[in-house]
Image (cartoon, rainbow, N blue to C red):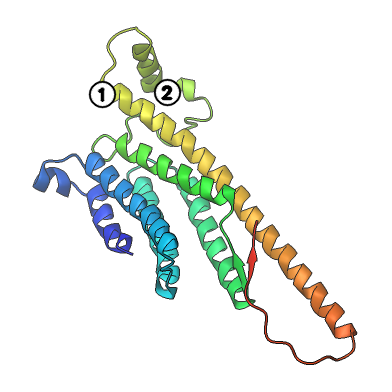
Amino acid sequence: MSRIFVVPLLVVVLLTPVSEDWLGVPRHLLGVVLFLAASFTDYLDGKIARQRKQVSRLGQLLDPIADKLLISAALISLVENRLAPAWAVVIIIGRELAVSGLRSVAAADGLIISASRMGKFKMASQVLAVALLIISSARGAPPVANFGQAFPAIQFWTVPELRAAVAHLFGAGATTATDWQVLLYTAGRATLWVVVLSACLSMYEYFRAFYRSSATRAARERDAARQPARAPTPPHAATTIEP
């Protein structure tokens, strides 16, 4: 839950020069440290809670909110700094809202939707993409001049900075810090495509699993209604859905 308090600090570091002016630390370095530390505490808190069997209702409520706040704040800050395209961020955040709404509806019906493998892969690739895009920024701006054009998944070879960085990497001149920023930025933008595709696929899996579980439950209730009346049975426990 401490991640909730890291969110405003992360936004300030990414969008203002406060880290350079007050601490003398480049914003992309302090930003990626804050983001990765918050992401790691998410994994560590969940692992410790499961091992000690100390999962509380408050934690179940606030942990998903903290995760979405952290990721959304980082992605929106990247859009503001022209490090990530807005359309990709809209898809990713929209997916998070849709799945959260689905979990709420499922919980009201006594269904628990567990995280799928694709969902976990999306989360890991999401953290990697955000970290790469933050660390590759040059004073909060992209290290390439053609941001917004077809880059890097389509016609990435047309980016002059990337061609120069690749040439330097494979021997034609010394590889500079700017070259590494361009290479990391390219990797981050490519990973962002992976995040978008896995987000859409995992959302489809969640909705399909919920639909199948709801249809199965409705069929059982219809069959039970056709049978002769029996003694009342206690309410069923929550059913876990495995996408």
Task: Relative to 126, say whether 103 is above or below.
Answer: below
Q: Quadrant of residue 51?
A: bottom left
Q: Position of residue 77 (x, y in %)?
A: 34, 50
Q: Quadrant of residue 175?
A: top left
Q: Position of residue 66 (x, y in %)?
A: 38, 62
- Give the residue at x 26% y 19%: 176
Question: In the rendered image, which quarter contains the C terminus?
Answer: bottom right
Question: In the rendered image, which quarter contains the N terminus?
Answer: bottom left
Between 206 and 78, which is closer to the camera in this rendering? 206
Between 216 and 197, which is closer to the camera in this rendering? 216
Residue pointed to by mark 1: 177
Q: Quadrant of residue 73?
A: bottom left
Residue pointed to by mark 2: 159
SS type, badge 2:
loop
- Give the residue at x 23% y 54%: 12
Callout 2: 10 Å neighbours few (<14), some, many (20+)? some
Q: Amino acid at mark 1?
A: Ala
What number is the disc on residue 125?
none
* The residue positioned farthest toward the front in the image shown: 52
Q: CA distance from mark 1 to mark 2?
A: 17 Å
Mark 1–mark 2 contact, CB under 8 Å? no
